[in-house]
């Protein structure tokens, strides 16, 4: 029975659809069923933080309907279908009361947004944006508003702040860190991005956090831990993402920070694989597009009979803050070495070198951002 079962991919984000596309390049016929909790619309998630800059709303960012994807990829797409469990012994996916047999199962079900527990009666004005449906809800709610408070000064918080200013909104960013993008950028580069965002009109409230969100007229009043208050029409929460691991863990699959897979994207359960934002690949949790594309290419080969290990090269991240173009490839956490800094105003070139002088990481802002490619070539790949 199970032999005739399809390859089942859970998730129609960039990971799920990229894998299906890669599979169809080498195998036109094996039945593939894609299961998604959402509407299955194909879109590029990184574009969600560029909507105002590119003058595109949720419809403008949608690339193809689930029907179009189904036809293009010769796959069945089951939309608004939530996986509730996995029986790895019987090779069955549980969909509420329904069941779906699989021959091979691929988990590409992404990451959940972290939600802060806040006091106050205005929490319906707080929005997280992690997919196109969230984005549509946010844009609808924003209609007529002028002031947005962004919780979080990480990559996504900074990108939304820049984009919302480009859309003409007043923007306040609140975050407990003393700098923007801590952990991603060295301080000098973070200072450059923050400075350019401030020049653009973004107001930063760093070293503190939001404790309450209360209704105030049509909008909200935010109370900060430092005692300040500020008003906004709505609040964007961009305080981080956590790989979805619960269902895998409940099925007895090994999880760590993400669903643990080896370089062949194999989980601890036979014929179950994972990639994308939900996966911890060989110890790396990288919630970005380049890694998932590399995984999709490798996994497509494995699923069509040629077991293939993914090889991560250098994975620079472009930060979409057009007021201060920025690219970064952070050094490994445990790397020994020092930052060498060149700076001219908000143009920063920060190179992390080992004691032997090897380049292990970089962050470049402003006019130096164009050096991203050349610097990437100098760096050792993640997987040598
Ligand atoms: P997702 O796109 O989250 O897809 C998950 C899928 O699983 C969805 O279809 C969902 O419905 C489905 N699903 C979840 N749970 C279930 C369930 N129980 N049952 C059935 N289906 C389920 N990365 C970059 O490299 N560069 C960038 O510039 C960049 N910018 C970004 C900007 C923003 C605003 C955001 C939010 C992210 C950005 N990223 C960027 C990260 C990048 O977009 C993600 O790494 C990538 O899109 C993740 O894709 P995914 O398919 O793994 O997950």
Image (cartoon, rainbow, N blue to C red):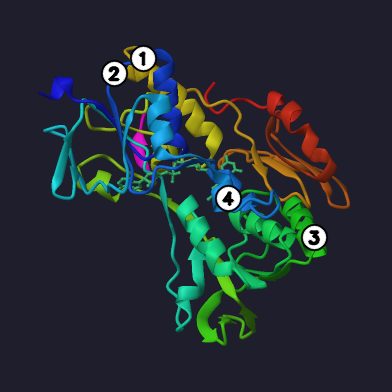
Q: Is residue 262 magenta?
A: yes
Return the disc, 1 or 3, that comes first in the chain's sequence. 1
50 displayed left or right of 374: left
Disc 3 and disc 2 in contact, CB within 8 angstroms: no
Residue 315's x, y, as percent?
60, 33
For ligand 1, tell me if the residue under mark 4 lies within 8 Å: yes
For ligand 1, tell me if the residue under mark 1 lies within 8 Å: no
219 displayed left or right of 323: left
Tell me if mark 2 has few (under 14), some (14-19) or many (20+) residues whose alpha carbon lies within 10 angstroms of its own. some
Disc 1 and disc 3 in contact, CB within 8 angstroms: no
- Residue positioned 39% across, 36% down in the render: 67
Residue 232's x, y, as percent?
62, 77
Q: Which residue is mark 1?
A: 27
Residue 238's x, y, as percent?
54, 60
- Per the model, the C-alpha gap separating discs 2 and 4 is 33 Å
- Per the model, the C-alpha gap separating discs 1 and 3 is 50 Å
Disc 4 and disc 3 in contact, CB within 8 angstroms: no
Q: Secondary structure at mark 2?
A: loop
The boundaries of the magenta stretch are 258-263
Q: Which residue is mark 3?
A: 195
Residue 357 in view in this figure = no
- Residue positioned 49% across, 62% down in the render: 137
Residue 30: mark in rendering: 2
Return the disc, 3 or 2, that comes first in the chain's sequence. 2
- Per the model, the C-alpha gap separating discs 2 and 1 is 7 Å
Disc 2 and disc 1 in contact, CB within 8 angstroms: yes
- Residue positioned 44% across, 43% down in the render: 41
Residue 136: mark in rendering: none
Return the disc, 1 or 4, that comes first in the chain's sequence. 1
Q: Which residue is mark 4?
A: 48
Q: Secondary structure at mark 3?
A: helix
- Per the model, the C-alpha gap separating discs 4 and 3 is 23 Å
């Amino acid at each position: 029975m199970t032999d005739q079962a399809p390859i089942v991919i859970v998730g129609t984000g960039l990971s799920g659809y990229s894998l299906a596309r890669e599979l169809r390049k080498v195998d036109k016929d094996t039945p593939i069923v894609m299961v998604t909790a959402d509407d299955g619309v194909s879109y590029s998630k990184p574009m969600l933080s560029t909507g105002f800059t590119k003058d595109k709303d949720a419809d403008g960012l949608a690339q193809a309907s689930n029907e179009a994807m189904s036809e293009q990829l010769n796959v069945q797409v089951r939309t608004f279908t939530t996986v509730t469990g996995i029986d790895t012994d019987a090779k069955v996916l549980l969909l509420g009361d329904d069941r779906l047999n699989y021959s091979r199962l691929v988990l590409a079900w992404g990451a959940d947004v972290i939600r802060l527990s806040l006091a106050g009666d205005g929490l319906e004005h707080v929005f997280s944006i992690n997919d196109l449906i969230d984005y549509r809800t946010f844009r609808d709610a924003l209609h007529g508003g002028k002031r947005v408070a962004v919780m979080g000064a990480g990559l996504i918080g900074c990108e939304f702040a820049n984009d919302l200013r480009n859309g003409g909104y007043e923007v306040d960013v609140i975050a407990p860190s003393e700098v923007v993008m801590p952990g991603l950028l060295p301080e000098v580069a973070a200072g450059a991005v923050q400075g350019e965002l401030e020049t653009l009109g973004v107001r930063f409230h760093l070293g503190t956090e939001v404790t309450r969100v209360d209704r105030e007229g049509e909008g909200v009043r935010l109370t900060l831990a430092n005692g300040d208050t500020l008003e906004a029409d709505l609040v964007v929460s961009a305080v981080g993402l956590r790989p979805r691991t619960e269902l895998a863990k409940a099925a007895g699959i090994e999880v760590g920070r993400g669903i643990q897979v080896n370089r062949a994207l194999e989980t601890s359960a036979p014929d179950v694989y994972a990639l994308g934002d939900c996966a911890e690949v060989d110890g790396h949790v990288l919630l970005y597009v380049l890694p998932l594309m590399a995984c999709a290419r490798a996994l497509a080969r494995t699923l069509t009979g040629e077991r293939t290990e993914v090889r991560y090269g250098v994975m620079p991240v472009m930060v979409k803050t057009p007021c201060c173009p920025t690219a970064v490839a952070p050094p490994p956490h445990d790397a020994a070495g020092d930052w060498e800094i060149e700076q001219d105003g908000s143009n920063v070139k920060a190179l992390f070198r080992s004691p032997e002088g090897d380049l292990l990481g970089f962050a470049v802002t402003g006019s130096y951002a164009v050096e991203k490619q050349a610097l990437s070539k100098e760096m050792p790949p993640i997987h040598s």
